[in-house]
Amino acid sequence: MTEYFIGNLLTGRRLQTLPVMTGPWSDQIHVAETITVTVDLNDADVRDLDLDSSAAPAQSFLAVRENGRIVAAGPIWTSVYDRPKRTLTLRAAGMASLFNHRLILPVLAATIGVDQWTVPDPADPTKTMPNPALATVFSGISLGTMAKRLVQQARTWTGGNVPIEFQPDEAAARTKTYDAVNFKPVWEACTDIMNMDDGPEINFQALDTDDLLGVKWLMETGTVAEPLITSTSIVDWDLTAKESPISDFQITTDATKMGSLAWQTGGAQNSTVVVSRAYDPTLVSAGYPLMELSDSSHSTVDRQDTLDDYATADVIAGRRAVEVWSFSVKAYPTDQLGNPAGPQVGDYQVGDFCNIHIDAFDPKALTGDPFKHAGGDFPMRIIGISGDEKGIDLKIDLAPALVA
């Protein structure tokens, strides 16, 4: 059963169930979930909800529940009233989206004089520097804990204490300083952390409160030992079974990041130029034309050996094309007797690993799969789940995989 409901964002208290005409939702890895619902104001029950106030953007949240589990929830950001149709459309995003609207600032920033945001630079009194008293400084904690502390600091402001729970701190030999004068959004900093080479994943998981009268969010972060956020269970789907729950299966093969010669540039942090080059003959020897790869995303790296490692990694990955698998799956698959058969919606979530089984292709019986004709078991990771108000099928996106 698919259920939509709204509530107060600051307290997490649930207000009312929302009957919807349409309600597509999507949960993608590393970004906030999205929910868009349209309701019919010709319906007296909908009018009685007084959505002009009870679903006020930025003050209210919208959530969707499947099979007893909240699959997406977060602030309502826009509402569109269509008077000719008498419909109202609400668009919401996951809790991470709120922190696009919060900056990395200590509470002191609210009261300190604006003329004190910079101080004389001890190294050169003719220059100024950001006031260290307004800096957010971390030392001795992991990247995931730094992200947590950023959110915790934002919650210390008046009006900032949204219902979020946190994991324990994790120690690590890390340091990081955020100067207030940069006015960096909290979620932008969290995204930067995730995009680091050893960065942990970060997610806000919506959960029911203990009294079942509201919603709270658990801020999950990967650890130093395990940067990925995933459960221990592995979902099994059989693509070629007679009663397979899978449909609309597609494979997109992308060779645009193949290459034999890789270039990396760095040194920007010290106003120097560091160039690295790596060559791998595998593709050219196999009859491919020469293709080059260029990457300046590590522009702050000034160590030659570090940049060389990046270039080497590029040509190793560049030996093969990338496959992207996607498909639809029944939200509540059943057997011929109507009993649950196979993974049900809510049994798995974004970040979990899965296994796709494909039978070998039989050209006489036309069973199996004619493209992946050898068949086999293919381990994959779920990076996106999308659904709608019907609650019949889900769209599943899997992490890109190198072509074997």
Image (cartoon, helix red, strand yellow):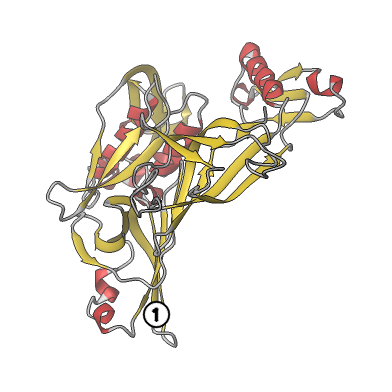
Please identify the residue farthest to the left as the structure is shown: 211
The structure residue drawn at horizontal position 66% and vertical position 13%, both measured from the top left corner, is 304
The structure residue drawn at horizontal position 31% and vertical position 59%, both measured from the top left corner, is 1
In the picture, the quarter occupied by the C terminus is: top right
The structure residue drawn at horizontal position 38% and vertical position 41%, both measured from the top left corner, is 348
Residue 401 seen in the figure: yes
At label 1, counting other C-alpha atoms closer than 10 Å, the crowd grade (few under 14, some 14-19, many 20 or more) is some
Compared across the picture, whether 141 is left or right of 84 comes to left
The residue under label 1 is: 87
- Which of the pair 139/220 is nearer the observer? 220
The structure residue drawn at horizontal position 46% and vertical position 21%, both measured from the top left corner, is 123
Snapshot quadrant of residue 55: bottom left
The spot of residue 338 in percent (x, y) is 35, 55
Q: Secondary structure at mark 1?
A: strand
- Which of the pair 144/280 is nearer the observer? 280
Compared across the picture, whether 330 is left or right of 307 comes to left
Q: Is residue 98 above or below residue 130?
A: below
Please identify the residue farthest to the bottom as the structure is shown: 84
Snapshot quadrant of residue 352: top left
How many numbered marks are there?
1
The spot of residue 259 in percent (x, y) is 76, 28
Q: Is residue 309 above or below residue 78?
A: above
Q: Is residue 274 above or below residue 379?
A: above
Q: Is residue 176 above or below residue 323?
A: above
Compared across the picture, whether 400 is left or right of 56 comes to right
Residue type, mark 1 in image: Thr
The spot of residue 161 in percent (x, y) is 22, 47
The spot of residue 354 in percent (x, y) is 46, 35
Please identify the residue farthest to the front as the structure is shown: 364
